[in-house]
Amino acid sequence: MSMKRVFLTISLIAMHAGAWSQAHDVASKPQVTITIREHPTTADLVEVTMLDAGYPRDLLKRQCEAIGENAGSPVRGLYIGAQTIGGDPKLRFLKASFATDNLIDRANSVLRLEPIVRAFAGAPAPYTVQGMSVSFVGEKPNRATVGKFSFPEVVSVVGTTANSSFGPQGIEYRVTLLSQDPARIHIPEQVSKVTDRAIPAPKQKASWFGPVVVITAGSLITGLLVYFAILRPSRPLRPSNPISRRKF
């Protein structure tokens, strides 16, 4: 991907910021983008990109470790570092990468958002996270997959399928934290587990531009593509063929 393409996509993001606000009143602009993909060994590889380059590394470290603790699998190989595009300080991001388990459970058709979202709740101002983009790379929705979900005054989730000619499909969730109390955040793993505490989110307009999910280990462009690359509108999340029960 050329630098010219990168700057073009950044401009498109700015142009559509207002349209996003109007079309998705339950979703906040992401302050952090997170991608998860399952490795052939079945480990879950996680990449976190904080759009604020000044975000405290110690705080991000604790949040990454909390993802593992919440998932019941301590993080492995945690790396945190700043990355800059073309030497431009305005294109500087804080990134983290690590491995953990239990976020993707294909055998039971489960994608776990709750351990991730809880980890970022409660950060002190001015680093409080209200908007998140969480993408499960290469995963496909089925009838058990949670799409739109809202827990009043606590959390709102809007899921879409990502389409890209540059990489695999996936499921992206835009998450809005309405409460900063991790103990209050409950996100069902499957549609059948939605209770009276959690009601479906209101219908949203489907015309919005989703980030392209592309994972390339150690690549600087990976972090940018997660948030800045706009290729074509995503489709609203709806049931598809069942996820294979075989672990890859």
Image (tube, grey):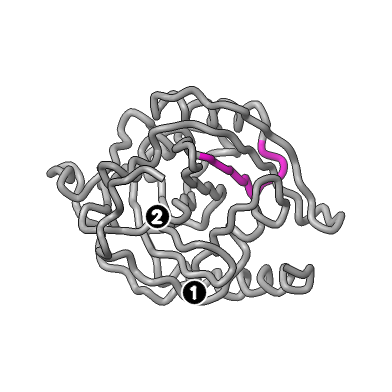
Mark 1 or 2, which is nearer the eye? 2
> Tag 1: Cα neighbours inside 10 Å, few (<14), some, or many (≥20)?
few
Percent x, y for residue 127?
59, 38
Q: Residues within 10 Å of mark 2 (few under 14, many from 20)?
A: many
Q: Amino acid at mark 1?
A: Ala
Q: In which image quadrant can residue 125 be found?
A: top right
For the C terminus, the quadrant is top left
Q: Is residue 115 above or below residue 227?
A: above
Q: Residue at x 66, y 38 (%)?
A: 55
**Label drawn at residue 19:** 1
- The answer to whether residue 137 is left or right of residue 79 is left
Task: Pick whichever, 17 or 192, lies toward us.
Answer: 192
Observer-nearest of 53 and 146: 146
- Alpha carbon of mark 1 to alpha carbon of mark 2: how far? 27 Å
Q: Is residue 130 above or below residue 96?
A: below
Mark closer to the chain start, 1 or 2? 1
Residue 116 horizontal/vertical position (percent): 44, 38
Q: Residue at x 38, y 31 (%)?
A: 182
Q: Amino acid at mark 2?
A: Glu
Mark 1 falls on what kind of element?
Answer: helix
Please give the residue where the numbered disc 2 appears in the rendered image: 139
Magenta run includes residue 16: no
